[in-house]
Amino acid sequence: MAQVSLRNVCKLFPGNVKAVDNVNLGIENKEFMVLVGPSGCGKSTTLRMVAGLEEISSGDVFIGNKRVNDVPAKDRDIAMVFQNYALYPHMTVIENMSFGLKLRHIPKQEIVQRVNEAAEILGIKRLFKRKPRELSGGERQRVAVGRAIVRKPMVFLFDEPLSNLDAKMRVQMRTELHKLHIRLQTTIIYVTHDQVEAMTMGDRIAVMKDGIIQQVADPISIYDTPRNKFVAGFIGSPPMNFMNGRIIKKEGKLYFDEGKIIVKLVEDMHKKMMPYVGKDIIFGIRSEDIYDKLFVSEAPPENIVRVNCEVYEPMGSEVYLYLNTGKHTFIARVGAHDKPKVNADMDVVFDMSKVHFFDKNTEDTIV
Ligand code: ATP
């Protein structure tokens, strides 16, 4: 097994399209690294450069301790699982799984053993004689993963492997891949645009935008301490609420003035926020850090805001409230028992110890 390292990696496509811009990323041995970002951010191109399917414009890629820029894909000791599975339609499941090993002249007995072992892990032995068209999406996905496992590569590369599955199957396969990683103890680089997959599967997550890595950290650090507004808004569902406003100072205390609502900053944030007094700023608060005042026994009066409840969305275990300050709309996630009146005013409480502030110009996190 191996670590993977990308150093100053760039990809320039014809027409001066900079798909990947100076990416530096180290993936540790046995680590599950997720590359996540919106469509077109360069994650697949990054993965394809590691795989050897795309030429590297500049920079270096190392697998283990070896620089692989000039090593052909077939000699890189990696296995890749694609979004469309890329199974051979005319071959049965067992033939699909064995094919790569046959090409590598692995002895027949070993092929049988490896294919059986992988099929056992994935629960697909009963499908051995079927062709891909006779399989469900989830089964095809398992066969594609099985075909990768039998190779026993140093590194697995996954490119949106679950995006063709229905929602239920996606959740199931997500857990299976997670378990598989624990069982196989291999290095995995996994590309997805789905932040839930990134949060639930990754040991660490690299968030990309416009070819640039914005932040690399474990899921909870990314969620709790995003480096900028983009990461804050991309990771988390519902997304973080943002409001434009100003920092103001009254009697030595700092407040965020949104125009319609005003809330008081906690003392801990004063030092960092002092230089922003009188300036425009972006305020961020996650939906779970907003409470219906009716259910808060002792809310500090400066953290209570009056809003209009526009929509009430029951999710089963919780409720999403779409609230309006008169200037901004935002979402609060409250308990299932909470049933405020729609189209009526209500008081909500902001947990000001959990809020974020972003620089209006750079959109970098201040606190
Ligand atoms: P998606 O989630 O939609 O697959 P992605 O994050 O994987 O997106 P890439 O496929 O890596 O993004 O593409 C990054 C950028 O490079 C995009 O702007 C895309 O249009 C461009 N691009 C990708 N392949 C080529 C190519 N062969 N020629 C020119 N431009 C390309």
Image (cartoon, helix red, strand yellow):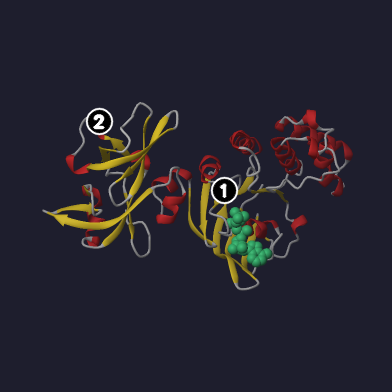
Which amino acid type is marked by label 2?
Leu
Query: Which structural element holds mark 2?
Result: helix
Is residue 89 depicted above or below 65 in this figure? above
Nearer to us of marks 1 and 2 is 2
Ligand 1, what quadrant? bottom right
Pick the front one: 159 or 326 = 326
The dot on residue 33 is 1
Is residue 39 depicted above or below 297 in this figure? below
> Is the shortest distance between ligand 1 and the CB of mark 2 under 8 Å?
no
> Residue at point 56% right, 48% down?
34
- Sequence-wise, the earlier of marks 1 and 2 is 1
Find the residue positioned furthest to the bottom: 15
Query: x, y percentage for residue 17?
Result: 60, 69
Which amino acid type is marked by label 1?
Met
User: Can residue 56 be spotted in the picture?
Assistant: no
Pick the front one: 142 or 233 = 233
> Residue at point 21% right, 60% down?
277
Pointer 1: residues within 10 angstroms few (<14), some, or many (20+)? many
Give the residue pinned by disc 2: 294
Q: Going by the image, does 107 lie left or right of 48?
A: right
> Residue at point 27% right, 44% down?
352
Give me the C-alpha separation between circle 1 and circle 2.
42 Å
> Residue at point 23% right, 43% down?
305
Is residue 21 depicted above or below 335 in this figure? below
Query: x, y percentage for residue 54?
Result: 69, 62
Query: Which structural element holds mark 1?
Result: strand
Query: x, y percentage for residue 317?
Result: 43, 28
The quarter of the displayed image where residue 178 is located: top right
The dot on residue 99 is none
Q: Going by the image, does 43 lie left or right of 281?
A: right
Pick the front one: 92 or 114 = 92
